[in-house]
Amino acid sequence: MQQIRHDVAPRNTGWAAEMKAGQILRLSARTIIDFVAFNRHDYTEAFDQAPTKEESGCIYFKRGHTLLSRTGAPLITLIADGFEGLGTHDLQFGMCGRDRHRRAAEEGRLDEYLHGGLMELPDHGCAENLTWALEPYGIKYENIPSPVNLFQNMDIDQATGRMTRTQIRPDAPVDLDLRADCDLLVAFSACPDKASKTKGLEVGAAIFAP
Ligand SMILES: [Zn+2]
């Protein structure tokens, strides 16, 4: 494989890039990544959590699973997962961000996070990072779907439905390889992961030609 692009997105920043069908995106990280994808030729064909879960029959995003658009079109497939056996990637939650941080503080819900009320709230998060990363493509916040939250390991209780954030992350950066199933615009946010000891870390992003 020939590497045609390599970037490092610092903690709590966004990143976006175009990919051609068949190209591989390698994300290297040990931190939560909020990831979205759009058909490059029609941004209304955006990743959608529900059709994706329906197709795979699974509430997690695992190796061999494909992110689908709302109309069921395949966008990108996870072909290698360095997190396999350690934890799972979340398909339930949305994005953290300025408004959600503020609301959690007002509602006294910061205890849901590791650092609780002692934490200094970041002035922005994944919502802002993805908005800024996608602004050059004319995509507004309201048209950014709820992401797949890579490395966000959730404990989900079958009986009550309660979802709890865990601190399970890779100890060292591991690779996720995703293959574009059509021409794509992809974007992610290196989350200011409030549920972890690290409070977020950088993310490596490389694109390879097949
Ligand atoms: Zn986030």
Image: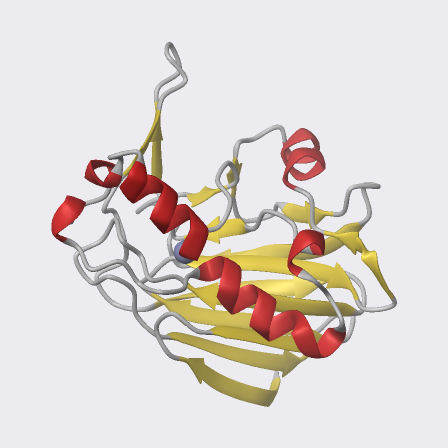
Question: Eyeballing the image, is 26 above or below 127?
Answer: below
Nearer to me, 149 or 206? 149
* Residue 66, horizontal then vertical, whole percent: 66, 48
Residue 174 sits in quarter = bottom left
| Residue 97 at least partly seen | no
Is residue 31 shown left or right of residue 1? left
Residue at horizontal 43 percent and vertical 83 percent from the top: 8
Of the 4 image quadrants, the one containing the C terminus is bottom right
Is residue 14 shown left or right of residue 145? left
* Residue 120, horizontal then vertical, whole percent: 20, 60
Nearer to me, 131 or 180? 131
Name the residue at the left extreme: 118
* Residue 160, horizontal then vertical, whole percent: 37, 12
Residue 57 sits in quarter = top right
* Residue 58, horizontal then vertical, whole percent: 56, 31
Residue at horizontal 67 percent and vertical 73 percent from the top: 135
